[in-house]
Image (spheres, helix red, strand yellow):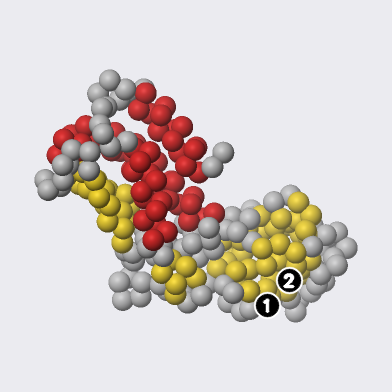
Amino acid sequence: MGLVDDFEKRLERAVEGVFSKAFRSDVEPAELGRRLLRDQEAGKSVSVGAVYVPNDYLIRLSPEDFARFEGLIPTLRTEFATLLKNNAGQRRWRLPGQIDVRFEQDDSLKSGKFDVDALHLAADPANPYPTVPDELVQLGSAKSWKLDSDEITLGRSSSSGIVVDDPNASRAHAQLSRREGEWWLTDLDSTNGTLVNDAMIKERRLSSGDRIKIGATELEYRQAGSGIT
């Protein structure tokens, strides 16, 4: 099931529940969701080797539609933010800050009409696309490593860029390589192999949230601006 299909099913359950009798409008919530996705893609900006998309969305509705939507707004804000965050994650787009979706009444709009303003709203306006490095985090511990060079070796050797203190790890177990702004993980013919999301790999492009297993050690790749903490 795709992102939009899953989103629409969740909205159907919400609208058919508490708001089923009160909610009647020529503007459909699913229509707003599809518009947000289009505006997210249309607002792409390339900076420092990464693609950034808007994180601040204002949905403007006519007075009649705003009144009809008002009770549903808290649910929609959460659902829309989740939809946009998941879409950005799947497409490896980055965000200049946390996603926020807001609603506003616009007296110039007629019933059934709406508009969306999508903006890049950074926490630091002077540096909207900071060159924050991605990182690798060891789960179950306080260890983390900033991925701030183009090639990083993972292994038991003390000379590795990321030292994996695990007797089941090879001295040079795997390598991270940055290619056109994306990270690839390659197994270096290790004795026990390298797993990503429980699947044995030889080489794999990483997505934010991917879990890497070397021996008994679990690491998580976190892309800067992905919202994963």
The residue shown at (55%, 68%) is 134
Residue closer to the observer: 139 or 38: 38
Determine crowd level at label 2: few under 14, some 14-19, many 20+ residues with C-alpha closer than 10 A: many
Q: Position of residue 41 (x, y in %)?
A: 42, 59
In this picture, is 184 found above or below 105?
below
Q: Which mark is residue 175?
A: 2
9 horizontally vs 90: left or right: left
Query: Amino acid type of disc 1?
Result: Glu
Q: Position of residue 182 (x, y in %)?
A: 60, 69
Residue 190 visible in this rendered orientation of the protein = yes
The residue shown at (40%, 33%) is 11
In this picture, is 99 found above or below 202?
above
Q: Which mark is residue 189?
A: none
206 horizontally vs 97: left or right: right
Residue closer to the observer: 26 or 92: 26
Question: Can you name the residue that lies furthest to the top here?
Answer: 21
Q: Which residue, given by chain and number where applicable, does mark 1 sit on?
A: 151
Q: Position of residue 113 (x, y in %)?
A: 22, 43
Mark 1 vs 2: CB contact within 8 A: yes
Residue 216 visible in this rendered orientation of the protein = no
The residue shown at (76%, 56%) is 195
Query: Amino acid type of disc 2?
Result: Gln
How many marks the image carries: the answer is 2
Q: Earlier in the sequence, mark 1 or mark 2?
A: 1
Residue closer to the observer: 173 or 180: 180
Q: Quadrant of the N terminus?
A: top right
Q: Position of residue 221 (x, y in %)?
A: 61, 61
219 horizontally vs 157: left or right: left
Q: CA distance from mark 1 to mark 2?
A: 7 Å
